Every structure is written in C-alpha cells, then in structure tokens.
Amino acid sequence: MEDNYANPAPLGLMGFGMTTVLLNLHNAGLYEMSAIILAMGVCYGGIAQVIAGIMEYKKGNTFGTTAFTSYGLFWLSLVFLIYFNGKAGVPTNTLGFAAWYLFFWGLFTFFMWIATWKHHRGLQTIFLSLTVLFWMLALRDAFGWNGAWAVLTGYEGIFCGLSAIYVAMAQILNEAYGKIVFPLGEKQAA
C-alpha cells in the first residue's frame, strides 16, 4: 500500500525548534519567563509535537513517533512544572531534583542521538546539541551555576532550536522545489 501521508517531521521540528529558541532566550538571560514561552510550550512545543508523533505512527516511523510524542510531552510537563510550582497544592520544585529530571531527559536524548546515526547530519546535530543542552541544564540546576554557565547554556539551546528550524525548513523547501535547496547532509550507510 502506498504511503500518501504528508511528512509530519517539519511540524514537529518547528514546534520543537521555535519553542526551544524562545525558552533559551530566557535561559540566556535576554528575557524573563513569560506567558509567550508557556503558551508555546503547551501549544506548539507540546500539542503540535504530539500530533506529529501520532502522524509518524501512521507512517510506521518508530523513531519519529517516539521522538515527537516524547518531546511534546516533555514540553507539557515542563510548563506544568513551571506554572504549578508551589501552587494549587503542588509542592515546590527543588533544583537538585530538577537536575535529575533534566539528566534523564538528556540520557533519553543521548540514546535517540545514537539512532540518528542512520539519518542525515541535520538530525544528528539536533539530537547531539539537545543532549548537551539537557546535561548543561542539569549541571546548572545541580550546582546552582547561574552565572556565565547559565548564559552559555541558553546560547547552546538557541543553537539547538535553530538547528531544528533549519531542518524543518529544509525538508519543506526541498520537497516543494523537488531538489536540494538546503542540504541536510548525507545519510549514514546502513
């Protein structure tokens, strides 16, 4: 049976990329936490990625299903942790425990990065930089590194988010024009 479904990856990558850039503009100290970041975390980073994950499931793509659904739910959980921190009977987050939350997301991402070795360089870049980002955030929270380390972490996150935006736009434009407009790097040999 022919697969005539649209490619859901650009939707998921844009949801991830734009939300990641906005959050890391905050992490880099350029903007305060705001409703803009939280709304993007729920709507585009969260819901849109879950939808992309469901679409990847219909295409039989285990990697895409796992990645988009997991990171969509990450965004939803992160917004919950930020918004309800110490409110409505929810206990206050501790930085030490938040570090474990971020560490395990980094560990998950590390193994997903290994799976990208069978994909193009653009995807490898996103997952490697996201692994680094999660672990930098975990170190920030574990040791209270809120100065230069936190700013550097924010800029690393901006790079990660922009990488996802690039890959999403490359997929859209390459498909629209039927040729390589923005290269993604060659696939690894099987």
Image (spheres, rainbow, N blue to C red):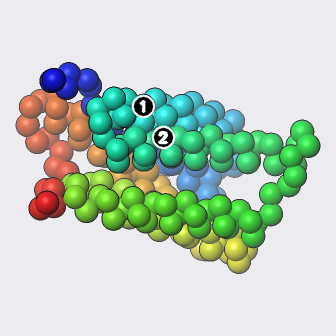
Tell me: residue 108, above or below residue 34. Answer: below
Q: Where residue 58 appears, x then y in whole percent?
A: 33, 29
Residue shown at 36% from the left, 34% from the top: 57
The answer to whether residue 35 is left or right of residue 174 is: right
- Furthest residue to the front? 1
SS state under label 2:
helix
The answer to whether residue 41 is left or right of residue 184 is: right
Tell me: residue 100, above or below residue 90. Answer: below
Residue to which mark 2 is pinned: 69
**Residue 89 in sight from this viewpoint:** yes
In the picture, which quadrant includes the N terminus?
A: top left
| Nearer-the-camera pick, 92 or 169 | 92
Q: Where residue 149 appears, x then y in whole percent?
A: 60, 74
* Quarter assignment of residue 83: top right
* Quarter assignment of residue 37: top right
Q: Which mark is residue 157?
A: none
Q: Which mark is residue 54?
A: 1
Residue shown at 59% from the left, 67% from the top: 103
Tell me: residue 138, above or below residue 52. Answer: below
Q: CA distance from mark 1 to mark 2?
A: 7 Å
Q: Give the total of numbered labels.
A: 2
Tell me: residue 145, above or below residue 46. Answer: below
The answer to whether residue 110 is left or right of residue 175 is: right
| Nearer-the-camera pick, 57 or 92 | 57
The answer to whether residue 33 is left or right of residue 115 is: right
**Residue 40 in sight from this viewpoint:** no
Residue shown at 62% from the left, 74% from the top: 139
Report the amino acid beneath label 2. Answer: Thr
Question: Mark 1 touching mark 2, by CB under 8 A?
Answer: yes
Q: How many residues crowd around disc 2 within 10 Å: few (fewer than 14), some, or many (20 or more)?
A: many
